[in-house]
Amino acid sequence: MSQEGKKLFNIIILGVSFMFIFTAFQSCGNIAQTVITNLNNTDFHGSGYTSMSIIYGVLSASNLISPSLVAIVGPQFSMVISGVFYSLYIAVFIQPATWAFYTASVLIGIAAAVLWTAQGNCLTENSDENTIGRNSGIFWALLQFSLIFGNLYIYLAWQGKTHISESDRRTVFIALTVISLVGTVLFFLIRKQEDTKAPGDDDSTNEILGESSSARNKMMKAVAAFKKSITLSFTKEMLLLSVTTAYTGLVLTFFSGVYGTCIGAVNRFGSEEKSLIGLSGIFIGVGEILGGGIFGLLSKKSRSGRNPVVMLGILVHFIAFYLIFFNMPNDAPIAPMEGTDQVAYMIPSKEVAMLCSFLLGLGDSCFNTQLLSILGFLYSEDSAPAFAIFKFVQERPSGEGFPLCPCLQSALSHPDCLVAGKPHWNRGFSMEEPRASGAA
């Protein structure tokens, strides 16, 4: 197999591995609060919103040290270890205990920071300036298949059910744990790239993350990676990109932990309300995959740069949030197990709810595919620190957003805030003229 073929193979394996792990984790996140609501009459007293807040808060903070951890352990083994912790978090729901639930939330937050830092490094190592757009699209599309498979099972298994039994819960989470472990094992198939670093290229990511038999050298590389993260945090390019990055984190909070819960609480959807949580996740996934595939395949053919794709994302989310505002009752995020009979500004419509799910996914792919692409292009020599900063900025709004979930729906459903940030977003994605990689 040619060197280019090996790189493409690695990107596909990377995407498929993430697809399996996040089939399990995102499905878990979508149904966690609904499942926990059904456990409130037992000894379990956890909160899905609090758990997600812990996860994303710890994830954000851990991104400060994740480049150093990846430097010591190596990107491939870092992803394997992180995958194990994802599986442990999901397994907690098989026999829930409050202490184990929150402990696992802390551990998976650290694991997620390491996982995404290593992913960014792997994506960049297997791409160049001509293939980074394509590879970002391929990875994103494969990753988002995770939303379809897990939620399809939930939709079919929970159709017509208004209460989630212990047997149903255990069956779902045992299956999700196994799926996550399969994705973890697949990381071992990623092939190590030959070292093509030019002599004297001391600042490259390959040196920072390269293997070394010397424990001292590894520690020096870990310190260098940490210092590089701090330096990159204050560059003009990274500060401009942080506006859009923070927004994607807030949207992630909404559709991964809030919107599905809202749909499952609307009694006017009838006996399908719980299964519609899974169907909503499927439509989000379809939007993500469609966006990732189109923007990845057309990345080399587009002469207009990244701005049109980002503008499409703004428009799509603008429409989605207004429709959600009109369709979803305001008390849906905090409705009791019995659900809510309230009406917003229109009679709740299943069709509109699913359309909004699709638009949320499509708009999210517009932003994230372009962010991954431009980070890989601008920081090809410093990919691990750059992607760590990206996840730090992205997950901080998520960590702060989940405790505010009861009021987050109403806040996000006023899309006027999208217009206010538009000039900054356009500036951030205008930085694609030819320049030396490894921007500082």
Image: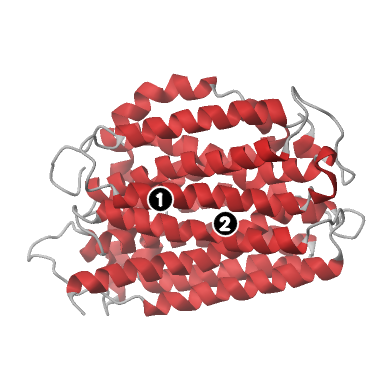
The residue identified by callout 1 is 292
Residue 296: image x %, image y %?
33, 51
How many numbered discs?
A: 2
Residue type, mark 1 in image = Gly
Q: Is residue 210 visible?
A: no
Expressed as whole percent of the image width and height from the top left, the position of residue 258 reads 67, 42
Which of 304 and 177 lies nearest the eye of the viewer?
304
Taking depth in this image into account, of 225 and 386 the one nearest to the observer is 386
Residue located at (67% from left, 73% from top): 175
> What residue type is disc 2 on?
Leu
- Residue 175 is left or right of residue 187, and the answer is right
Taking the image as drawn, is residue 331 in sight? yes
Mark 1 or mark 2: whose residue is earlier in sequence: 2
- Label 1 and label 2: CA atoms lie apart by 13 Å
Q: Could you classify mark 2 by the number of other residues whose Cα lies within 10 Å: few (under 14), some (14-19), or many (20 or more)? A: many
Residue 394: x %, y % from top left:
47, 43
Q: Nearer the viewer, residue 409 or 192?
A: 409
Quadrant housing the C terminus: top left
322 is higher (above) or lower (below) than 156: above
Quadrant location of residue 233? top left
The residue under the point 33% across, 45% down is: 230
- Given the current orientation, which residue lies at the most extreme right position? 41
Name the residue that disc number 2 marks. 147
Left or right side of 331 for 189: left
Q: Secondary structure at mark 2?
A: helix
Callout 1: helix, strand or loop? Answer: helix
Q: Judge left or right: residue 13 versus residue 376.
A: right
- At a point 27% along the width and 74% down the height, the residue shown is 211
Q: Which mark is residue 91?
A: none
